[in-house]
Image: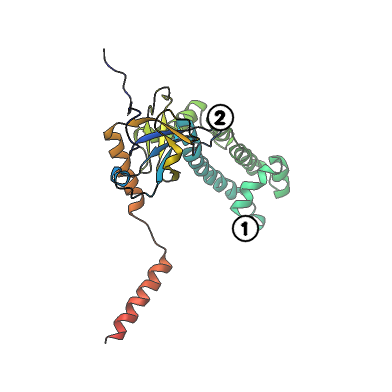
Amino acid sequence: MTEPFAEYRDISVTDPLRQGDVLEAVDPSASKWQRHLLVITADCDFAYDKHQGRVTCVPLLTAPEYLMEMQVPRIRERFMTKIVGVLRKVLPPDSGANISDERLRAWPCEAEPAEIVAALGLDGRDAETAKAALESIRLISQPAGTLDEAVELVVASYLAAPNAQKRENVVQQITEALKGPYSQPPGDALFLSAVAPKHHLGYFVYLRHLEQVWEPEIATGPTRSAVSYRRISRLQDRYIHALVQRFALVFMSIGLPKEYEEIRDFHSELLGETYK
């Protein structure tokens, strides 16, 4: 019988802590950033004690958590920018120039669209366009507790906007944006379908958030000692290698500000003047 596919493998309690181990917090109330961690400290650091007891890890977020944290804000921001632009086009020239984009984003959360339209002195088609845009901004600005709630608010915002598309087209557009990280993940994340027994909900490893855990606080097998984490599995080698490669690429290229480059060039030129 064919074994079900999984990116992890079981390990013995006698196996030492190593890169690719999946840790689970003992505290059930641990935050999503600390609940499940993936060890990225190199095996050679463990072997030669180069890590000084500090185990570097990255979080394993459930797929809904990752999409809520990383993808939904991008979808909201793109549409918010578009709708604010639509609203600005119908503002009266005398008052519109004095209203910032930040104010246009905040105003619909403080007053009803009809009140704002009246305050702006709009009428006719411009008033209808402004009212629809303001309602769209209000909806997309509402907080959401779950991914389902967030998607419904984004869909409602799209449908409330001027010249809205059909619902099925809006839903498809948003769904495609949420599906993107699965097949074409950004450089700082990777999808895993399962990370340990009974953990098959779908997860994203997020490589820009680092957590450090003291090695004595990690249990690799049954223990009576007070610990913060227990090891529950280890990723298969190809997934460990792929993630470590991605992790290195995330931090390999670091952009520096223009001011730094200018002062660096100034010091370089001073050196050149010294030896003329």
Residue 156, labelled with which disc?
none
Q: Which residue is mark 1?
A: 97
146 lies above or below 81: above
- 163 relative to 42 in the view: left or right: right
Q: Quadrant where the C terminus lies?
A: bottom left
Please say if the residues under marks 1 and 2 sit with CB atoms less than 8 Å apart. no
Q: Secondary structure at mark 1?
A: loop
Q: Nearer the viewer, residue 238 or 82?
A: 238
Secondary structure found at label 2: helix
- x then y, percent, for residue 70: 47, 40
Q: Quadrant of residue 191?
A: top left
**Mark 2 nearby-residue class (10 Å; few <14, some 14–19, many ≥20):** some
Query: Where does the image place residue 209, in percent across and percent down from the top left?
Result: 44, 45
Q: How many marks?
A: 2
Q: Is residue 269 left or right of residue 260?
A: left
Q: Give the amino acid type for the residue marked by disc 2 in the picture.
A: Glu
Q: CA distance from mark 1 to mark 2?
A: 33 Å
Q: Residue furthest top?
A: 1
Res. 23 image quadrant: top left
Residue lying furthest bottom: 276
Residue depicted at 39% across the width and 37% down the height: 38
Q: Amino acid at mark 1?
A: Ala
Residue at which label 2 appears: 152
Q: Residues within 10 Å of mark 1 (few under 14, many from 20)?
A: few
- In the rendered image, residue 22, in percent from the top left (x then y), is placed at 39, 33
Image point 44% across, 44% down: which residue?
214
Q: Report x, y in % for residue 33.
A: 49, 39
